[in-house]
Amino acid sequence: MIEACDVLVIGGGATGGGTALDLALRGLRVALVERRDLTDGTSGRYHGLLHSGGRYSVRDPESARECIEENRLLRRIVPHAIEDTGGFFIVTPDDDPSYADRWVVASRECDIEVEEITVAQALKEEPALNPLIARAFRVPDAACDSFDVLSALAAAIEGLGGTVLTYHEVVGLAADGDRVTGARVRDARTGEEQPIAARMVVNAAGPWAGQIAAMAGCPVIVRPSKGTMVAMAYRFVNTIINRCHPPGDGDILVPVGTVAVIGTTSVSVPDPNENGVEAWEIQRMLDEGEKMVPGFSQVRALRAWAGVRPLYEEGASVEGREAKRTFAALDHAERDGVAGLVTVVGGKFTTYRLMAERTADIVCANLGVAAPCRTREFVLPDVRVPLSPPQLHWPGHRLEDVEESRQRDPLICECELVTQSQLEEAARQHIDVTAPWVLDDLRRDLRLGMGPCQGGFCNVRAAGILHARGHISAAQATLDIQDFAERRWKGQRPLLWGQGLRQALLDEHIYRSVLGLDRLEPAQNMSDVSVLG
Ligand SMILES: Cc1cc2nc3c(=O)[nH]c(=O)nc-3n(C[C@H](O)[C@H](O)[C@H](O)COP(=O)(O)OP(=O)(O)OC[C@H]3O[C@@H](n4cnc5c(N)ncnc54)[C@H](O)[C@@H]3O)c2cc1C
């Protein structure tokens, strides 16, 4: 039986997590429900850029202003999730040179600090850049780890007495006449359904927000826009690189941990679950990457994945790059005559806190709560597994740590240098080990399986350790290994050439010939994989 709460928030992405925290800080009893793990939606599939706003300053200045203001705020309230890489906007030989001056004026009007630097200076800082660039500008972009942000939000919500329920899917809303009074949730582990009563419900289901609103009979037309990204096996740059031109495909390169991620495309899709990667998207990323970093396409591509943007403009029907990146918080009492329900949709990861504030304001107005928003000052807790990253990522830092503790702490994942003690610590502290797909959850905490071998070696080792330590049964270990292998394979499949192809064949050999994984009987459902101990 799940306890009744003041506000039930649906969706464990940045927007839902941010909204639940805002409401908890105003003294309300909140419950956050997510059908899978936190960040399983767009927030865990995004490009990782804490926008300065420069990308939007010419076409969408409202979004640009929101981004720069929140960029400054997030650096204060969640510093441990942000790597202050800085960003460059560069004019390559393929870009219209007249755009740069317009862009500088527009960006400064949006209060974005833009500093022109010489090409020689840009190349000194980032020697891999195309030497033929005509101009370079410095902006306050940064890299932001969404897994760390959501872990911090969840810890803060729970610290304030709120509830965070992962692997609970909302399958229907409860109503009393024209008032939403809660939801029915299904536990993914047991299939059991139960009600959660709430005085208000917030729909923060991102690209799926239209489906939740429809459960209350409210029409919310979200325009899902798929974007594909490719992680290259090398951190070419330490600065975020943007092309100085109107937003297009494959024109941003973000250093993320040991790799660099290029993105994205923008393809309107009819269904938010449509996140398959197509061959032309990969080719486009490699071709565009060459324009920023010569030789880019010759480097090994590690994996490709796509996220789906929850684009929304009230009353408008624009799609893809034409759509604004601002957001809407919809009070369905005013809009549709359905009380007790608020939908928040659109926006950017960078603006999640602002979206949460506006949404919480509406909820509080409905509940007669006068407490003000506190998220501008509230510093989020740092709950990461200790991986001791420095302020600026240096690919060798984990190796240095491992060398210091050599002999005592075996490596589980050689690519990302994850040790056994880190794995065990994550399993003890951060993971709901009763959840299905625990290895994929561990990946988000540790980067387990995210390097060149894509889980080929660490998958089985990690499952073995979790089983030996009594966290998971043998049946669940089998299911987890299969699930993790399939997920890693999904990202490798579009990139089957060169070293990546060799790796995929080796992984397949290990899984099929050595382990016979395809011949093992998988558990029938999650109730067969009850947790030991
Ligand atoms: C390719 C791409 C690149 C991007 N890059 C950037 C970037 O670099 N910087 C930036 O600031 N923004 C970026 N964005 C935008 C940003 O990622 C999104 O705007 C943001 O993550 C949306 O967060 P959200 O919480 O609203 O949605 P989501 O993160 O999708 O969260 C919604 C959650 O609701 C859950 N859910 C759905 N239905 C149910 C249900 N029935 N019951 C329970 N839970 C449910 C889902 O599982 C999901 O976890 C990018 C987007 C894309 C697609």
Image (cartoon, grey):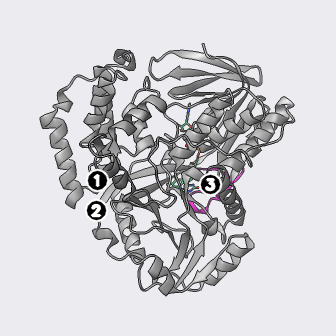
Q: Which mark is residue 300?
A: 2
Q: The residue tagged with tag 2: helix, strand or loop? A: loop
- On screen, residue 216 above or below 254: above
Looking at the image, which is closer to me, 271 or 497?
497
Identify the residue under disc 3. Answer: 350
| In magenta segment, residue 382 | no
Q: Where in the figure is residue 259, as x and y percent of width and height?
A: 38, 59
Tell me the residue at 64%/36% (across/down).
156
Left or right position of 309 against 284: right
Circle 2 crowding by C-alpha within 10 Å: few under 14, some 14–19, many from 20: some
Q: Where in the figure is residue 123, as x and y percent of width and height?
A: 45, 81
Q: Magenta region, mostly helix, strand or loop?
A: loop
State the extent of the magenta-drawn residues as a range.
Answer: 310-326
**Sequence-first disc among 2 and 1:** 2
Circle 3 crowding by C-alpha within 10 Å: few under 14, some 14–19, many from 20: many
Callout 2 touching callout 1 (CB < 8 Å): yes
Q: Which mark is residue 452?
A: 1
- On screen, residue 401 above or below 486: below
